[in-house]
């Protein structure tokens, strides 16, 4: 991959420093009975952003523990009330009410997923900047709900077969609504191609007793990356990937032994190894004029989606 035609992100994060941050975060989170969690997350994000460089400049995460804590309280109160209601229904010993209560509870969780994704993107991107230029998300919650509900219904009707098409629809909508200053993005992919990748990947993983999994993961990552374009002044610049299954296999094997021989204490080194590999294998065209970026996004300080995505265990960004 020519360095003249493409540029990559570079991470300067060090495993030893990450270990220190994680250790302090763990101790303070335990001592405060979990209250410190929002500040721990903010500190971790600030470290990773500040150590990530692109074309000589580093990223900045402007989010704070205070912002996340306010959202954390909202979510804690909401779920506490939900659980309290279920316990109350249980004490009434009315099976019909208990069943209705459980249905309402799980439907509520289900309906929160699009909201969590939408809010997460609005907060995380608006609090991310490079050279003082902020990112942003312009998607509409109602549109995301329509795509999500339609996708779930079709997945049910097709016994899950529609899932790749749903993923592509969601990803396409989200990416086309992301902004980086005056830069726009698009995701042009077909659900059928993703279905085929999953079908072949799953089949070969079973046949090879799991050995093919790194190649499976690499194929999905390449699909996501290489179907993404950066748009500037109506000109499209494809994002390139040099991620390979063989490299992923070697990476995972070494990571496994690091974790085994360090009894898990080597996790920061594993995280840094994974981060470095992925960043150095994603390539952006140098024809994109980064000096021409113009600030176009507003600040958004409601971190509800940030904490809610953690609560619902959503792997979004």
Image (spheres, helix red, strand yellow):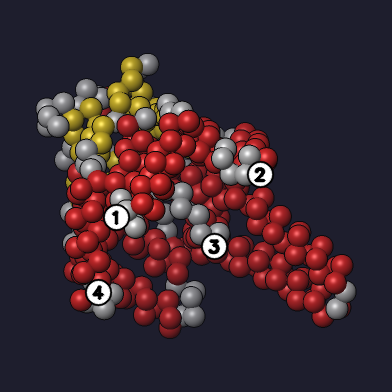
Q: CA distance from mark 2 to mark 1?
A: 31 Å
Question: Element type at marker 1?
Answer: loop
Question: Element type at marker 4?
Answer: helix
Is 79 positioned to the left or the right of 283 in the image? Answer: right
Is 129 positioned to the left or the right of 161 in the image? Answer: left
Q: What residue does disc 4 label?
A: 260
Image point (20%, 44%), residue name = 280
Answer yes or no: is residue 236 visible. yes
Q: Is residue 57 above or below residue 294?
A: below
Q: Sequence order check: which comes first, mark 2 or mark 1? A: 2
Q: Quadrant of residue 242?
A: top left
What percent of the width, then of the height, locates residue 190? 46, 28
Q: Is residue 277 above or below residue 219?
A: below
Answer yes or no: is residue 49 visible. no
Q: Quadrant of the N terminus?
A: top left
Image point (34%, 62%), residue name = 44
Q: What residue does disc 1 label?
A: 211
Q: What residue does disc 2 label?
A: 156
Question: Element type at marker 3?
Answer: helix
Q: CA distance from mark 4 to mark 1?
A: 19 Å
Q: What residue does disc 3 label?
A: 311
Image point (82%, 62%), residue name = 100
Q: Sequence order check: which comes first, mark 4 or mark 1? A: 1
Q: Sequence order check: which comes first, mark 2 or mark 4? A: 2
């Amino acid at each position: 991959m020519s360095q003249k035609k493409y540029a990559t992100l570079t991470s300067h994060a060090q495993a030893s420093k990450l270990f220190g941050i994680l250790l302090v975060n763990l101790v303070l989170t335990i001592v405060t009975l979990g209250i410190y969690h929002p500040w721990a997350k903010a500190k971790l994000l600030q470290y990773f952003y500040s150590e990530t460089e692109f074309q000589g400049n580093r990223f900045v995460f402007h989010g704070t523990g205070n912002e996340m804590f306010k959202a954390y309280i909202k979510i804690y109160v909401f779920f506490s009330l939900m659980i309290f209601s279920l316990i109350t229904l249980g004490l009434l010993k009315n099976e019909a009410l208990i069943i209705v209560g459980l249905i309402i509870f799980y439907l509520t969780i289900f309906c929160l997923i699009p909201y969590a994704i939408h809010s997460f993107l609005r907060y995380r991107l608006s609090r991310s900047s490079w050279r003082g230029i902020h990112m942003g998300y312009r998607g509409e919650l109602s549109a995301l709900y329509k795509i999500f509900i339609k996708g779930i219904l079709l997945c049910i009707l097709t016994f899950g077969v529609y899932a790749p098409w749903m993923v592509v629809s969601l990803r396409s909508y989200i990416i086309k609504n992301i902004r980086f200053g005056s830069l726009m993005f698009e995701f042009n992919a077909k659900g059928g191609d993703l279905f085929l990748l999953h079908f072949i990947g799953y089949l070969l993983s079973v046949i090879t007793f799991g050995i093919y999994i790194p190649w499976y993961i690499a194929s999905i990552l390449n699909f996501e990356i290489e179907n993404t374009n950066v748009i500037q002044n109506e000109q499209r610049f494809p994002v390139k990937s040099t991620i390979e299954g063989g490299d992923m296999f070697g990476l995972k094997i070494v990571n496994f032994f690091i974790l085994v021989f360090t009894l898990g204490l080597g996790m920061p080194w594993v995280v840094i190894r994974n981060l470095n590999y992925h960043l150095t294998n994603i390539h952006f065209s140098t024809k994109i004029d980064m000096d021409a970026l113009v600030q176009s996004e507003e600040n958004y300080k409601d971190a509800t989606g940030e904490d809610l995505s953690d609560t619902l265990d959503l792997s979004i960004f």
